[in-house]
């Protein structure tokens, strides 16, 4: 697998709380140069990126990284993000609903945000590091039935990131039209190739370009 193919699957990511405009601008410049799938950035920067990089595919995050905002808050945040120029939405589910067994509320929230997103891509982050296998399997069904485009492993801010075991579990239990995004802890070229070959359509990482250029990275 060549570097261009790998990068075409990468959401080039910078989500740290203290990200400066200079850092975001570098991210966007790299995304254009290397033709990554998108940049994944904080909502605060959407409109400025849209103004300065009108042809760049912008992904942003909602309810990030903890997921426990109210559904109304997430809906409003999604609406504002799209109005500012976002093309893709990565939302975090409410993990307290998972632990309370309230999967109907999770389904309703994903569906509501999907209605706001409309034709835009919606990815659902389930934060696998906090879940049992049974919870992951149930959420594969919830995400599939709720009409989201992707199920995503992790925020990169939890206790662990993507694992191959979780990707393979997703493949077994999601509907065929639901795609997979692996994120968090992707550190090597071998990791990226392995996840893509296992069926991941997107990879969330801040490290891809550094890794493929021969460097080492310890970020998202």
Image (cartoon, grey):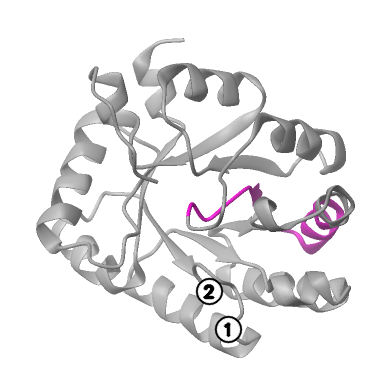
Q: Nearer the viewer, residue 173 or 132?
A: 132
Check disc 2: other Cα within 10 Å, few if <14, some if 14-19, many if 20+: many
Q: Position of residue 187 (x, y in %)?
A: 42, 30
Q: Circle 2 is placed at which residue position?
A: 63
Residue in view at x 57 percent, y 40 percent? 182
Q: CA distance from mark 1 to mark 2?
A: 6 Å
Above/below status of 34 relative to 180: above
From the viewer's perspective, tell me whether residue 173 is left or right of residue 69.
right
Residue 84 quadrant = bottom left
Let me know if residue 72 appears in the view. Answer: yes
What residue range appears in magenta?
139-156
Image coords of residue 178 (percent x, y): 72, 44
Pick the residue in front: 147 or 91.
91
Residue 121 image point, x, y percent? 55, 55
Q: Residue furthest left?
A: 22
- Within 10 angstroms of label 1, few (less than 14), some, or many (20 or more) residues? some
Whichever of labels 1 and 2 marks the residue nearer the N terminus, that label is 2
Q: Pointer 1: what residue? A: 69
Outermost front residue: 159
The residue under the point 54% across, 57% down is 158
Above or below 89: residue 150? above
Q: Position of residue 155 (x, y in %)?
A: 52, 56
State left or right for residue 193 relative to residue 210.
right
Residue in the picture at 64% in, 56% down: 127
Kindly check if marks 1 and 2 are in contact, taking CB atoms under 8 A apart as contact.
yes
């Amino acid at each position: 697998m060549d570097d261009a193919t790998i990068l075409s699957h990468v959401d080039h990511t910078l989500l740290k709380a203290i990200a400066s405009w200079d850092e975001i601008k570098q991210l966007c410049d790299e995304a254009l140069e290397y033709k990554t799938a998108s940049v994944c950035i904080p909502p605060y920067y959407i409109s400025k990126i849209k103004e300065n990089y009108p042809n760049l595919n912008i992904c942003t995050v909602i309810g990030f990284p903890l997921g426990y905002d109210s559904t109304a808050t997430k809906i409003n945040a999604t609406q504002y993000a799209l109005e500012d120029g976002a093309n893709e939405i990565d939302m975090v589910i409410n993990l307290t609903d998972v632990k309370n067994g309230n999967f109907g509320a999770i389904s309703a929230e994903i569906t509501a945000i999907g209605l706001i997103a409309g034709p835009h891509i919606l990815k659902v982050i389930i934060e696998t590091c906090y879940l049992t296998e049974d919870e992951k399997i149930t959420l594969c069904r919830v995400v599939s039935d709720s009409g989201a485009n992707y199920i995503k492993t992790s925020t990169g801010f939890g206790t662990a990131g993507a694992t191959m075991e979780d990707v393979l579990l997703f493949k077994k239990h999601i509907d065929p039209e639901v795609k997979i995004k692996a994120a968090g802890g992707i550190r090597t070229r071998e990791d990226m190739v392995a996840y893509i070959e296992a069926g991941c359509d997107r990879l969330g990482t801040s490290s891809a370009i550094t890794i493929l250029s021969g460097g080492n990275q310890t970020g998202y």
